[in-house]
Amino acid sequence: MAMPANALDIAWVHSNAAAQSEQRVKAGFDAWLKETNKGDWKVNLLDSGGSGEQTASNIQDAASRGVGAIIITMADLRASRAALDAARAAKIPVFAVDSGYVDGVVADITTNNWAMSADVSPYLLDQLGGKGNIVFLRMAEHHGTRKRGDVMAQVLKEYPDVKVLAEHNIDYTAFFEDTSKTMEDYAARFGKEINAVWAPWDEPAQAAINALKAAGITDVKVIGIDGHPQAVAEVCKPDSMMIATVSQPFEGMGKMLGEWIEAIVVNGKPTEEVVPAKTVYMDAPLVTKRNCKDFLK
């Protein structure tokens, strides 16, 4: 049933509100609200602090309050089965961004994480000339970063002259600090043996660069994924260790959320007429020192 716009109450469940990717999705959504004069939409933010269990608790809380829609960003939904069932029972549509499609979600807006890694991972190894020593930073708790790491692991099998000096699973509850401490340790242990760092997204890539610089190590190739403005600017610096990222359209994801919610929740259109698939992939091009100026904001 269509509902008046002024009655729309939305719960936004952040996996980790400190993550720039989530902030950019929210910024895109906010810009859409302003452009379409949705000042009467109320958005209540719930931060899960990187915890899957807290994500489930926040979804349950939103469902119990009877909101008009729930948005979930960059979450691990494996612990949220009961909470999603509660939302369904309350007839509350749940929209996800980069959280992986699971039953109980209308759809997941994302980019193709396998494809992004398939672009940037060989690029890094090719820039090394197919040989050298790398630090492999992973994060298995999020479907997207897990897929990126899995692709890199497969790609590495075709590069026998590339050695993984160390592999680390980042603690998402304090990702920047954890990466910084880990790289400080690796810089002390391996020093200039480190030729490259593979990071699953931009902020750990920057944390790695900071730690390497502090240790006086500057001849290292580092990649990230997300294409945040600071990362693109870093790639564009000729002498920067950051050689590539992948530009994800986070603001566009936020805009798409707004359009879907307006069509389905406010205007009462059938979901199948609005949402083309359970998982909707947006384009995410590779950003290198050759084309980075095209992505500067």
Image: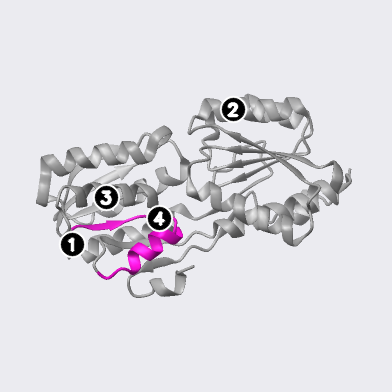
| 164 is within the stretch colored magenta | no
Residue 210's tag is 3
Query: Mark 2: which amino acid?
Result: Ala
Q: Where is residue 250 in the image (x, y as percent from the top left)?
A: 55, 56
Of the image marks 3 and 1, the number of the one nearer the N terminus: 1
Foreground tag (3 vs 1): 3
Residue corresponding to mark 2: 56
Q: Which of marks 1 and 2 is nearer the N terminus?
A: 2
Q: Which residue is tagged 4?
A: 225
Q: Looking at the image, tell me whether mark 3 or mark 2 is earlier in sequence order.
A: 2
Residue under the image location 74 percent in, 32 percent down: 88
Q: For residue 3, what is the image quadrant? A: top right
Asked if disc 3 and disc 1 are in contact, CB closer than 8 Å, the reply is: no
Residue numbers of the magenta segment:
220-238
The residue where tag 1 is placed is 130
Q: In this view, does 279 lie above or below 18?
A: below
Q: Quadrant of the N terminus?
A: top right
Residue 117, percent across and down? 38, 56
